[in-house]
Amino acid sequence: MMFFLFLSTLLFLRSSADGSIKTAESYWTLKPNVLVVNVDASDDVNMVPLICGEAYEGENITWTRNNDENLEAQGNRIVVTVEAWKGGNFSCFNSEGSYLDHTLVLAQWPFRKIIKNTPEKGYIDCSTNNYGGSFKCKWEWGENRNGHVVHIKATRSHGGSNISCSVDDRGQSITCLDHDYCPYAEEVERINLTIYFRSSFVVEAYNTKFYIMDIVRPDVVPISRINKTSVEVTYPRSWNAPSSYFPLMFQVVRCRKREKCDCSKPNLQEILITQSHQLPVTKGMCVCVRARDEFCNSSWSDWSQYKYVYLTFVIFLSKRLICFTPI
């Protein structure tokens, strides 16, 4: 009780003397052993109380910052100052020098610099290739930033949820699974996803909300040759079955000039939206196909391409490459 009375008095005096110094209410717990200090300006100074552990009351406790700076403050409970983005990793030790515990203090700015904001996809781009309940979210790092994910929160809008997430090996995306998701039931609540990124001792929070049906994007559509006059498009293997319950809509582009066929920039007059699985082709024609959920206005898959060309033999003779096409 005496400690907290002393701390309250100290914080009041410091706040009165300098308006930029904030009370201990400016920090919050992100997860065990990690505190976050809210910083509004580059010259903010925040005072944060730390505790080594309830079991160490009355013991001779020493502290270090970032494992290389010995602090003058001693005891189980101390107060440290955090200036702007200058957080730190504070560790406590007993009288024999043995490690006891630590607290990582991070500063959260109102700015957004650790990852990029793209015009089309925002800060975080989430998608899934089916209605299995899993989804993947990715991002791009900001200029001259070397960050990593420090915490992930994924919940439905109301009540409890059972969503687990993991950071992928490269550290530029996460994979999540909603264990309670049912593809045959109406999805009434959005997923609320918050990712906390850390760069040095600065942390930034990025949030996005979505339904699974809004981020569905099928994998590329397989195209196979049937005979001399037609090809067949089929559903991606990753798509849900049965197809009668999860139908896809196909968008088809046919180009007669195969050497200039660009699926990403089709001639609008040659676009055909169809549910047919067989498409007629002729020699020299290039066919581009992509798909999306027929019932939802979600994203199209990437284009898949098929070129109907003459059979060409290639013969390697010495160091010369000889190609010829039989008539």
Image (tube, rainbow, N blue to C red):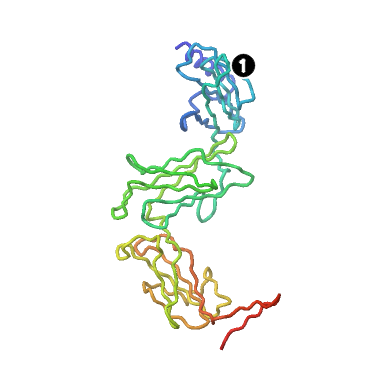
Sort mark 1 into few (<14), some (14-19) or many (20+) by Cα contacts within 10 Å: few
Residue farthest toward the bottom in the current orientation of the protein: 327
- In the image, 318: left or right of 154? right
- Quadrant in which residue 108 is drawn: top right
Which percent across, then down, holds residue 32? 46, 29
Q: Could you tell me which residue is drawn at 54 percent across and 12 percent down?
A: 60
Q: Could you tell me which residue is drawn at 56 percent across and 40 percent down?
A: 111
SS assignment at label 1: loop
User: Which residue type carries mark 1?
Assistant: Glu
Nearest the viewer among 311 and 251 is 311
Which percent across, then down, holds residue 152? 46, 40
Which percent across, then down, holds residue 188? 31, 49
Q: Could you tell me which residue is drawn at 49 percent across and 16 percent down?
A: 8
Above or below: residue 265 compared with residue 209: below
Which percent across, then down, holds residue 271? 45, 74
Can you say which quadrant of the picture contains the N terminus?
Answer: top left
Residue farthest toward the left in the current orientation of the protein: 185
Above or below: residue 16 compared with residue 246: above
- Work out whether residue 251 can be spotted: yes
Nearest the viewer among 120 and 311 is 311
Instruction: Tell me the residue that label 1 is attached to.
Output: 72
